[in-house]
């Protein structure tokens, strides 16, 4: 492992988990539920008949793969809260910036994926006899938005881990003062 390079295995696993989550999110968008209105002649009421619910499973799968990738990275870096302190300097600043934006994009991606899965699983039940209605379905683009934020999270995670390893492996700069204590002798 080169200085400040980080573990290639961690990089690879985070990228693979995020790409799998991206694939599931795109598959969920392509397989969203659609409903058709049917009329029950016996009761004279209308209802919706939905096709496959597989997009909900894909959305939850994308959610779980992204969560596992983020958990892996946060476990390795200990969320910047525990472990070795970061050396002062530019690498620490970039680490904090990438950490913050990575978590923000992760939360947005997870929200899009789980909200899309929940809304896709919702099905309209029976309506009244005279009401005109349409079958509730998931809007286009919810899973695509989640997929975009999955890719943004992946890129930010890679940069976060790269700068994190640089900030933890570089030695802290020490000042070359003759005395490191505060002199109070002249005030006595």
Image (cartoon, rainbow, N blue to C red):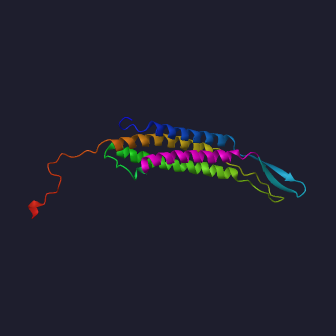
Tally the marks. 0
| Quarter of image, res 98 | top left
Segment colored magenta: 51-78
Q: Is residue 91 left or right of residue 31?
A: left
What kind of secondary structure does the magenta stretch mostly adopt? helix
Furthest residue toward right:
42
Q: Is residue 139 visible?
A: no
Q: Quadrant of the N terminus?
A: top left
Q: Which residue is pictured at 44% across the width and 49% down the height?
A: 100
Q: Nearer the viewer, residue 102 or 77?
A: 77
Q: Is residue 90 above or below residue 119?
A: above
Q: Is residue 118 visible?
A: yes
Q: Nearer the viewer, residue 52 or 152?
A: 52
Q: Quadrant of the C terminus?
A: bottom left
Q: Which residue is pictured at 65% across the width and 42% down the height?
A: 29
Q: Residue 178: give x, y in percent of width and height.
A: 14, 48
Q: Residue 78: give x, y in percent of width and height.
A: 43, 50
Q: Is residue 188 left or right of residue 132?
A: left
Q: Residue 114: give x, y in percent of width and height.
A: 61, 51
Furthest residue toward bottom:
188
Q: Is residue 75 left or right of residue 37?
A: left
Q: Which residue is pictured at 56% across the width and 49% down the height?
A: 110
Find out whether residue 107 is within the magenta segment: no
Q: Which residue is pictured at 54% across the width and 49% down the height?
A: 108
Q: Residue 71: give x, y in percent of width and height.
A: 50, 48
Find out whether residue 61 is within the magenta segment: yes
Q: Is residue 96 left or right of residue 154?
A: left
Q: Nearer the viewer, residue 45 or 131?
A: 45
């Amino acid at each position: 492992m080169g200085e400040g390079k980080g573990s290639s295995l961690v990089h690879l696993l985070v990228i693979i988990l995020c790409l799998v989550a991206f694939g599931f999110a795109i598959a969920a968008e392509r397989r969203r539920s659609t409903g058709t209105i049917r009329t029950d002649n016996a009761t004279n009421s209308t209802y919706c008949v939905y096709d496959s619910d597989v997009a909900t499973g894909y959305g939850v799968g994308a959610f779980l793969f992204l969560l596992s990738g983020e958990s892996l990275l946060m476990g390795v870096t200990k969320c910047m809260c525990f472990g070795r302190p970061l050396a002062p300097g530019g690498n620490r600043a970039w680490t904090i910036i990438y950490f913050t934006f990575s978590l923000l994009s992760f939360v947005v991606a997870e929200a899009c994926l789980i909200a899309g899965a929940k809304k896709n699983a919702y099905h309209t039940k029976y309506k009244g006899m005279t009401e005109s209605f349409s079958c509730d379905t998931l809007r286009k683009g919810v899973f695509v938005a989640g997929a975009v934020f999955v890719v943004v999270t992946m890129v930010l995670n890679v940069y976060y881990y790269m700068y994190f390893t640089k900030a933890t492996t570089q030695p802290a700069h020490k000042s070359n003062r003759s005395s490191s204590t505060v002199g109070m002798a002249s005030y006595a």
